[in-house]
Image: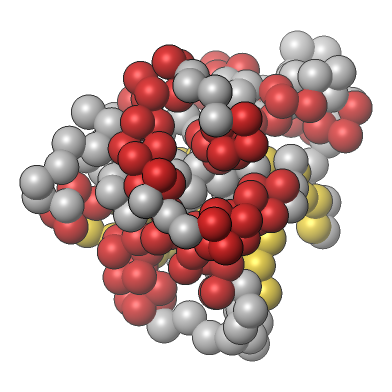
């Protein structure tokens, strides 16, 4: 039976991703929806993208655009330094890209270009960060909000789980989809080290860029798979700490 997994923010932790796939005993029949932020954090950012480019040749994949991926893409296209990117893990990624040959760089540019802003499947939404438009991400006035927004997750956390959807105060955004899967804002910020559900929003970012683990979830069974804390694989590095 095919399984569909939502994979949290990797942030260059390729070794953790490989451990995660091994522990989950994945097959080529499974589908993988990657929630974005493949780079910035650990030293395997460039290797992670190369791995995913090859992985999609043998597995069914959906790759979403994260804010860090867009920042890396902008630099690869323009070669213009971005201090915001550098301050949040981009400097190490830039250094690794400067070592890369032209052919592989072009492959990465195409990968970034083809990332999806969001994915809808069986009335389930998969998006890196969130959306602000009350009619859904496809109506977002500023498309970049889908990989920068934090208000969707904040709204879900602040909503009383006992509130009826018929209550006029119930957030309209949360009514649009049966389930919403996001990354972007680590669950460790609220003291949770596993994918966490608030109303119908599942947050699968468990802080892999920092001291947390890399996580993925079977969207049907809700079985959770996690690596060891990612920093264990990179003992001489600081990640985004």
Residue 4 located left or right of residue 228 = right
Q: Residue at x 82, y 59 (%)?
A: 122
Q: Position of residue 37 (x, y in %)?
A: 50, 42
Give the color scheme: rainbow, by chain, secondary structure or one colour: secondary structure
Q: Position of residue 49 (x, y in %)?
A: 50, 58
The answer to which of 4 and 14 lies nearer the viewer is 14
Q: Residue at x 55, y 74 (%)?
A: 54
When the figure is inspected, residue 36 is found, relative to residue 88, above or below; the finding is below
Quadrant position of residue 14: bottom left
Q: Residue at x 65, y 67 (%)?
A: 61
Q: Residue furthest left?
A: 236
When the figure is inspected, residue 127 is found, relative to residue 139, above or below; the finding is below
Which quadrant, please, contains the N terminus? bottom right
Q: Position of residue 152 (x, y in %)?
A: 64, 24
The answer to which of 81 and 7 lies nearer the viewer is 81
The answer to which of 114 and 99 lies nearer the viewer is 99
When the figure is inspected, residue 106 is found, relative to residue 129, above or below; the finding is below
Q: Residue at x 49, y 64 (%)?
A: 50
Which quadrant, please, contains the C terminus? top left
The answer to which of 52 and 110 lies nearer the viewer is 110
């Amino acid at each position: 039976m095919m399984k569909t997994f939502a994979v949290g923010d990797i942030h260059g932790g390729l070794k953790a991703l490989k451990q995660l796939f091994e522990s989950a005993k994945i097959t080529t029949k499974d589908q993988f929806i990657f929630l974005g932020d493949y780079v910035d954090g650990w030293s395997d950012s460039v290797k992670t993208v190369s791995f995913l480019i090859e992985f999609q040749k043998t597995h069914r994949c959906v790759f979403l655009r994260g804010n860090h991926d867009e920042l890396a893409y902008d630099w690869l296209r323009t070669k213009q330094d971005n201090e915001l990117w550098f301050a949040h893990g981009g400097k190490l990624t830039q250094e690794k890209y400067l070592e890369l040959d032209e052919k592989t760089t072009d492959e990465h540019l195409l990968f970034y270009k083809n990332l999806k802003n969001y994915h809808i499947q069986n009335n389930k939404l998969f998006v890196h960060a969130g959306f602000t438009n009350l009619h859904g991400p496809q109506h977002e006035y500023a498309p970049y909000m889908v990989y920068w927004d934090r208000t969707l997750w904040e709204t879900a956390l602040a909503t009383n789980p006992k509130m009826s959807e018929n209550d006029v105060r119930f957030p309209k955004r949360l009514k649009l989809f049966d389930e919403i899967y996001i990354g972007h804002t680590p669950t460790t910020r609220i003291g949770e080290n596993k994918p966490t559900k608030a109303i119908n929003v599942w947050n699968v970012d468990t802080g892999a860029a920092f001291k947390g683990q890399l996580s993925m979830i079977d969207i049907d069974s809700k079985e959770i798979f996690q690596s060891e804390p990612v920093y264990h694989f990179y003992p001489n590095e600081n990640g985004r700490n």
